[in-house]
Amino acid sequence: MKRLSGLKWVCTVVFLIVSAANVVLFIFIGKYETLNTVCNYLAFIFGITALISIGHDHLDRSNKATEFNARLSYVFYIAHFPVVVLCQYFLGRAGVGCELNYILTVVITYPVVYGMCFLIDKTRYIRVIFGLKRK
């Protein structure tokens, strides 16, 4: 991690350049598939490296909100999928477009799922079903 921390900004710059080249090759030029594939893999390698090193340096903090989210992350993982599917189903039936469907799904499901997670955390018998320890 110390070596990666020293190269994080180099990896970030390379990631941005290779990602831009990947987009230009894929959308605008289109006839260099091999070079496009190489740019795609390089963007993946340098992007993951940059994110890991920047995250290690700047996101390694803890507070009440991060502890709550870490404790309930599995509950959120389980609860979010049915809520997202139901929301998109009903919005699709209502005839909204793709962009509005996405925006409304995000705006509706995050508060609903966080509320469900909060209720699951506070309910004694249900929390055990989701793998949370008893208080």
Image: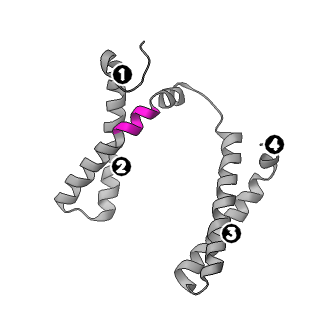
Q: Nearer the viewer, residue 127 or 110?
A: 127
Q: Are marks 2 and 1 in contact (CB under 8 Å)?
A: no
Q: Nearer the viewer, mark 2 or mark 1?
A: 1
The answer to if 25 sits in the magenta stretch is: no
Sequence-wise, which precedes: disc 1 or disc 3?
3
What numbered label is drawn on residue 17?
Answer: 3
Q: Which residue is mark 1?
A: 127
Q: CA distance from mark 2 to mark 1?
A: 25 Å
Sequence-wise, which precedes: disc 2 or disc 4?
4
Where is residue 123? Give x, y as percent.
31, 18
Q: Which residues are magenta?
A: 73-79
What residue is rendered at 37% in x and 37% in y?
78
Where is residue 115? Give x, y as percent.
33, 31
Q: Nearer the viewer, mark 1 or mark 3?
A: 1
Where is residue 70? Give x, y as percent.
51, 30
Seen in the picture, residue 10 relative to 56 is either above or below; the reply is: below
Q: Are marks 1 and 3 in contact (CB under 8 Å)?
A: no
Quadrant position of residue 118: top left
Colouring method of the image: one colour
Q: Nearer the viewer, mark 3 or mark 4?
A: 4
Q: Which residue is mark 2?
A: 106
What residue is rendered at 65% in x and 71% in y?
39
What residue is rendered at 34% in x and 47% in y?
107
